[in-house]
Image (cartoon, helix red, strand yellow):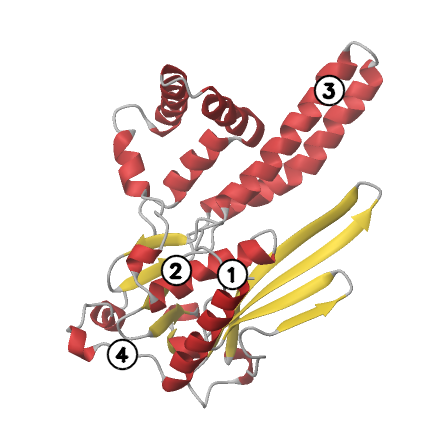
């Protein structure tokens, strides 16, 4: 599947497309895991998953607090209005909540595995099939769209990563596959993509600290997941207060009550502890470390593109 070269920017009214790969050149953004996609990381491979529990919980929790607040305000003023607000909230929040619950009880989708030593990507497909895709053929793009209303300008963005089936005899409906991450904007999408690119081109040390769901569950042992999460949140607030970090404590309280942070951590730990892994015998062997002399190297084309891009970023920083 043809795609514009990395670094290409296409703008139209209220939207912008930034093409990030191929070839995977630096974006200029610091790697940040915006959507908790890093499930497993070591010196050989990176497992990336697409289960955005936090984004769904934040929206539903905030909407719930919004409707509950208005219900309490109008309860003493006009019971009919408060009743309407309550039922509206149950419908507007309840339907997405049922869909979310259904997604939570379904089996967790397998991750995509990026092997930096072989410079290949294992893409699991249906019915036990998988693709081994060369890293430098992976396509990535950040897509940002804006809308203007009486409330002001609203911007949303997605990171799209697509893969081509290396089998030349594959059927037409099995030649391409795409993943989408709801990141919030082009810079956020680039920072998310930079996690994968930096791991493959720089190394594991270039990535931010990832979620260690097993370690988090271990700290809650003996308390239970729900009660342990609540205790951990209270202890975090008290620790900031003892250190005199008042603003940090206030920020944590806001995250707890306004965005449901403890619920997010609890559900992520329950759903992704441990994260699913690729248990195909051939992929287990493929995931074993190689001697350094057998590691795959960058192509000449990518090497030249990276040098050019780094020079461009350096010149931009000096302006």
Secondary structure beneath dot 1 equals helix
x and y, in percent, of residue 152 in the image: 79, 44
| Circles 2 and 3: CB atoms closer than 8 Å | no
| Between 179 and 244, the one nearer to me in the picture | 244
Q: Residue at x 73, y 55 (%)?
A: 146
Q: Element at badge 3?
A: helix
Q: Tell me the crowding category of disc 1: few under 14, some 14 to 19, or many 20 or more residues within 10 angstroms, Cα based.
A: few
Q: What residue does disc 4 label? A: 296
Q: Relative to 38, is 21 above or below?
A: below
Question: Can residue 123 be spotted in the picture?
Answer: yes
Determine whether label 1 and label 4 are within 8 Å by CB: no
Q: Residue at x 64, y 26 (%)?
A: 65
Distance from disc 1 to disc 4, alpha carbons, whole Å, reads 32 Å
Per the image, the residue denoted by label 2 is 111
- Pointer 3 and pointer 1: residues touching (CB < 8 Å)? no
Q: Please name which of the two marks, 2 or 4, marks the residue nearer to the observer.
A: 4
Tag 3 residue:
71
Quadrant of residue 241 within the rendered picture: top left
Tell me the residue that label 1 is attached to: 317
Quadrant location of the C terminus?
Answer: bottom right
Q: Residues within 10 Å of mark 3 (few under 14, many from 20)?
A: many
Q: Earlier in the sequence, mark 2 or mark 1?
A: 2
What is the quadrant of residue 270 in the picture? top left
In x, y percent, where is residue 308?
46, 77
């Amino acid at each position: 599947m043809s795609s514009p070269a990395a670094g290409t920017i296409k703008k139209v009214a209220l939207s912008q497309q930034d093409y990030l790969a191929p070839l995977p050149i630096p974006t200029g953004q610091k790697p940040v895991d915006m959507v908790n996609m890093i499930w497993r990381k070591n010196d050989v491979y990176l497992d990336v998953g697409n289960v955005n529990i936090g984004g769904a919980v934040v929206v539903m929790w905030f909407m719930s607090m919004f409707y509950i607040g208005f219900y309490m305000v109008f309860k003493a003023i006009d019971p009919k209005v408060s009743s309407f607000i309550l039922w509206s909230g149950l419908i507007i929040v309840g339907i997405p909540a049922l869909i979310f619950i259904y997604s939570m009880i379904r089996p967790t989708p397998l991750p995509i595995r990026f092997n930096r030593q072989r410079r290949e990507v294992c893409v699991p497909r249906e019915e036990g099939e998988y693709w081994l895709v060369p890293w430098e053929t992976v396509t990535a793009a950040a897509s940002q769209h804006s809308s203007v209303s009486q409330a002001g300008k609203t911007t949303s963005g997605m990171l799209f990563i697509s893969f081509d089936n290396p089998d030349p005899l594959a059927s037409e409906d099995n030649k391409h596959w795409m993943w989408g991450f709801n990141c919030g904007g082009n810079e956020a999408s680039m920072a998310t993509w930079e996690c994968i690119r930096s791991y493959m081109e720089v190394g594991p040390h270039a990535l931010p600290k990832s979620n260690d769901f097993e370690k988090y569950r271990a700290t809650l042992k003996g308390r239970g997941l729900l009660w342990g999460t609540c205790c951990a949140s209270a202890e975090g607030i008290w620790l900031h207060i003892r250190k005199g970090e008042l603003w940090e404590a206030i920020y944590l309280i806001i995250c707890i009550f306004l965005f449901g942070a403890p619920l997010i951590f609890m559900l992520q730990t329950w759903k992704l502890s441990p994260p699913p892994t690729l248990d195909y015998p051939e992929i287990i062997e493929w995931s074993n470390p190689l001697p350094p002399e057998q590691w795959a190297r960058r192509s000449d084309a990518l090497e030249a593109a990276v040098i050019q891009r780094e020079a461009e970023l350096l010149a931009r920083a000096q302006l």
